[in-house]
Image: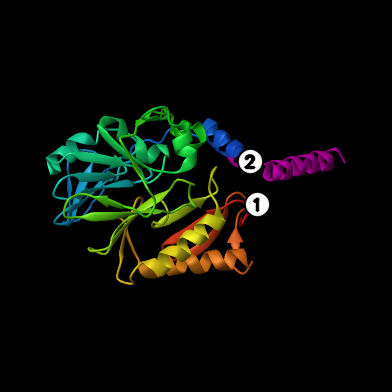
Amino acid sequence: MRRLAIALGLGLLGAAILAFPFRRHVFLQLYAGLTPPPALLAPSDEGPAVRWFDDYYTVERIDDATWAIGEPRYLQQVFSYLILGEARAVLFDSGPGLRDIRPVVEALTSLPVTAVPSHLHYDHVGNHARFGSVAVIDLPHLRARARGDVLRPTRWEHLGFVEDVPVTDLRVSEWLAPGAPLELGGRSLEVLHAPGHTPESIALLDGERGQLFSGDFIYPGPLVAMVPGSSLGDYLRTAEGLVQKLPETVALLTAHRVEPPGAPRLAYDDLLDLRRALVEIREGRREASGAFPRVFRVNARMELWADFWRSWD
């Protein structure tokens, strides 16, 4: 009887945690406390299209003015993109900051570089402070917090405590209006607000070259929709908007991969699969495994990790 009472008590405790409004925060805090920062992976065979810059970074030429800078030895295998115009360049994301990305960038271009975060998680903004020009999406809740040109991500926007990565200030030199062009000189990128993974997430669209730099909205592997700020409703609205806006020939250049070789790429069909999965999750027609996260299969290359308590507002 005592064992039954203990089991029942633990079950009720677990249920209370799942129902608790800050369960995502509690989960991440527990995960950080129980999991040490990841060790570097062994160097991988990246194939003939990729060269190792040093013993950590890789470089891959996407086209004559676009480079993928990879960190395949970092557990999350994050990729940043150097996008060149005639007057300046954009570095879309900068990795977790385990190593200095600036020498890689300077070896590829002599243009002035503006660092642009796809969102504020630590594995995407770790090197932004090394650049004199930083551009951030112009959203009311971010503008309201900025002190002059300084924007400091909150603990739950940054999440660096998960891997002992300290929060650093962003010195914002340019605010990017959603839907507006980001002019590089002879090349224009459209700034797309793409919430779902986080409220401030963006993607950059080069309509002329048919390229979408998607950040963490979509990539091969587990799409995370169960951290603070994630929203399945936003995920679906963004997916529907992109499906309507993008041509079927678009190349999705994404921020993470699960295996080599080279930069992670997806296609328009993957975006269709994500939209379909989100619709079926909302309607209760897509099966899942696990409790927290709830894992939904999207296609052979993607999963969606969702909260136990799914909100579609």
Q: Which residues are magenta?
A: 1-24
Q: Main secondary structure of the magenta part?
A: helix
Q: Quadrant of the C terminus?
A: bottom right
Q: Is residue 262 visible?
A: no
Pointers 2 and 1 in contact (CB under 8 A)?
A: yes
**Residue 146 sits in quarter:** top left
Q: What residue does disc 1 label?
A: 309
In the image, taking residue 307 as reference, residue 102 lies left or right, namely left
Q: Residue at x 46, y 54 (%)?
A: 222
Image: 299 above or below 180: below
| Residue at the image point whose x is 47% and y is 31% from the top | 161
* Magenta stretch encompasses residue 18: yes
Tag 2: Cα neighbours inside 10 Å, few (<14), some, or many (≥20)? many
Please determine whether, in this image, residue 93 is positioned above or below residue 285. Answer: above
Q: Secondary structure at mark 2?
A: helix
Q: Secondary structure at mark 1?
A: loop
Whichever of callouts 2 and 1 sits on the residue coming sooner in the sequence is 2
